Amino acid sequence: TLLAALLPFLTLIIVFGWNNAMHIPATYFMVSDKVVVAVAVDMLVMSLNVLYARICPPGIEGVFMTVLTSAANIGAVIGGQISSKIIEALNITCDEDPNDADKVVCDFSNL
């Protein structure tokens, strides 16, 4: 959990350009961040699944896990929609950098 909490800060290495000084492409940092966070989240979900399996009554494990998985998926979709609407309401835009096609420039000036 601590590793998953600290890894998103690898993005700061890209923001400050330290990866260029180390001669490491930015894609390595972004891919490693996404992969490690996804694995950490899966490990957390797996431990919750074990807990759910222990507390549910015998014989309805399948139904219980289906309901919990559905609730988690619905929550993820609703969270994505809410964050999308917040970004839209705050008028945050991101476009490709005209000088470098590999970079994306986001406009946070409306905040």
Image (spheres, rainbow, N blue to C red):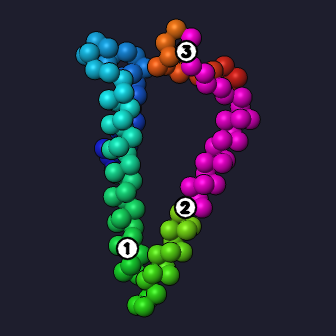
Report the residue that reaches farthest toward the top: 99
Up/down of 29 relative to 54, above or below = above
Give amino acid for label 3. Asp
Residue at (66, 48) in percent of width and height = 81
Amino acid type at image mark 2: Asn
Percent from the top left, x then y, of residue 90? 71, 31
Disc 3 on helix, strand or loop?
strand
Dot 3 alpha-carbon crowd within 10 angstroms: few under 14, some 14 to 19, many 20 or more:
few
Start-end of magenta stretch: 74-98
Say whether residue 39 is left or right of residue 109: left
Q: Residues within 10 Å of mark 1 (few under 14, many from 20)?
A: few
Point out residue 83 in the picture as x, y percentages from the top left corner.
63, 43
Please name which of the two marks, 1 or 2, marks the residue nearer to the observer.
Answer: 2
The answer to whether residue 10 is seen in the rendering is no
Asked if residue 62 is positioned above or below residue 102 in the image, the reply reads below
| Separation of marks 3 and 2 at Cα, in angstroms | 34 Å
Whole-Å distance between the Cαs marked 1 and 2?
Answer: 18 Å
User: Mark 1 against mark 3, which lies toward the viewer?
Assistant: 3
Q: Which residue is mark 3?
A: 97
Residue drawn at (64%, 54%), measured in percent from left and top?
78
Task: Tell me residue 66's x, y (percent).
Answer: 50, 75
Q: Is residue 51 visible?
A: yes
Check disc 2 and report the residue beneath it.
Answer: 73
The tag on residue 51 is 1
Nearest-to-viewer mark from 3 and 2? 3
Question: Which amino acid type corresponds to the residue marked 1 in the rendered image?
Answer: Leu
Question: Left or right: where does residue 37 sit relative to residue 109?
Answer: left
